Image: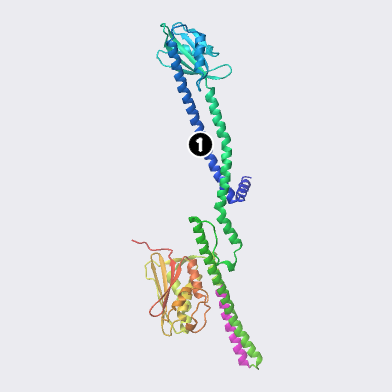
Amino acid sequence: MDQNSSEQKRSFWSGISLRAKVTLWIVIAFAVVKITLVLIILLYQQRAIHTSFDAAFQERVHIIAGDLAGRDGDINESYLRGIALRETNNLYIQDFSLLLVDAATATPIASYGRESTLLMSAAKQAINNTENVIDYASIMNKENVLFRTAASRIRLSNGVHAVLVVSTSDRYTASVSKTVGRVMLFSTPFTIGVIALVAWFVGGVAVKPLEQVRAFAENLRPDSLVRPIDIDGSSSEVDAVREQLDAAMERLDSAYQSQARFLANISHEIKTPISVVQSEADVLMMSKPSADDYEDFVRSTGEEMQRLGKMVESFLLLTRVQHGDTRVRRKSISANDLVMEAFEQSLTMARQYKVRLEPDLCQDENDPKVIGNEDLLVTAANNLVRNAIRFSPEDEVVSINCKQDNGKLYITVRDRGPGVPEDLLPRLFEPFTQASSERRRGRGTGLGLQIAKGIAELHGGDIQVKNHEKGCGFTLILPLSNPPETV
């Protein structure tokens, strides 16, 4: 159930458009910030209101105490009512109650207000307090209304020591706090809605280049690979995407053109032996062939079919290498064994071309080894050696040198032939690339070098080519499996 639930959530989330996701994340982020700010503002507002209330209340207590201390006449309920009515004009102070108590006898002198009877406890506490400070407290009446009280010791004009207790409700502060809270509460959904609209617009601007890329991909055809992609916007990210897509289109176009040339060359190469056999068959049918003619026809057909078979085998191997076949079995291979295997397999061809092969093995104490598929690596080295034999003059030497350096194995095959034409170097490893004017005995498939390079790259290596004053050298580079320790 848990796995199905998580899969459903992922499916639901993946079905939402990127624009909606951007909008949702912006709204969530803003809502979190907005709610946090509202809470901070409310806390600060509550503190500020109560601070102002406390300051105003303390000031009123001092004024009332001064008035009573300077009173020459009687202090009664009527006099306290006048003081209370006067002080209720203050914005913060409302619902005044006053109590004046004789400190010596703890009996009321005068009182005013409906809460005055609740103030005796605050008066008695102030009587017991020897310090001349104002005692602040809170009381709750029968209606569960909270009142703030302040008790102050004073000395009346007749010499009597008394305690003044003043109480007032905080209805005003509560009303202000509630009003501010409501404003914040009702304004938050509105502002979040506005932000959602803005985020939807911003998300549309952000994903517009992606929509253009999608539209471009829908209309992409092989004949439109050279057309530059049109993406609105001038930001660094959009410019980078545009540049990368243009570069990718160029690579695709180059690969497409190379593939087209490859197919055309395949068609031509396969057609050649078929045309030869067809032509010889037509000639044979138009005459009265002898037994020797039939024998020549069979031999020629066999040679052409053998050449066609080798070509098909090369196609299959090239396809296997180009697709990086991971099913090939790998093992540790000795570099010297690799050189000697290529040497032995090429001896017969070297004798036919009257060319000498000279292997130069690695002389290191530790036999360098590489990890890979032995058949493929031998094929790569063998193709380089056979290519060198094919273009070497008679009685010349093809050297096969092996060495290691900086954790890599270098197998260099060098001939003493005419070298590679400079105009042919950039496309030397493309299929069917051959210098027809320099082909010697026997015709190759034109795929050997590309197969060798593909095998090298499949094993994390490469092939480099370099013309010398006499001849040309191909170097097969492979990473070592046991690089020597450097001091």
Taking 320 as reference, is 414 left or right? left
| Closer to the camera in the image, 40 or 431 | 40
Type of amino acid at the residue the image marks with label 1:
Leu
Which portion, as a residue range, is magenta?
290-315
Q: Nearer the viewer, residue 1 or 148?
A: 148
In this view of the protein, can residue 455 be seen by the observer?
Answer: yes
Residue 163 placement (x, y as % from top left): 45, 11
Query: Badge 1 is on which residue?
Result: 37
Occupied quadrant, residue 133: top left
Q: What predominant SS class does the magenta segment belong to? A: helix
Q: Which quarter of the rendering shows the C terminus?
A: bottom left
Residue 483 location (% of width, % of height):
40, 63
Identity of the residue furthest to the left in this view:
487
Coloration of the structure image: rainbow
Vertical arrangement, residue 335 with respect to residue 50, above or below:
below
Residue at 47% of width from left, 77% of height from top?
424
Left or right, 351 with respect to 316, comes to: left
Label 1: how many residues lie within 10 Å, few (<14), some (14-19) or many (20+)? Answer: few
Q: Quadrant of residue 336?
A: bottom left
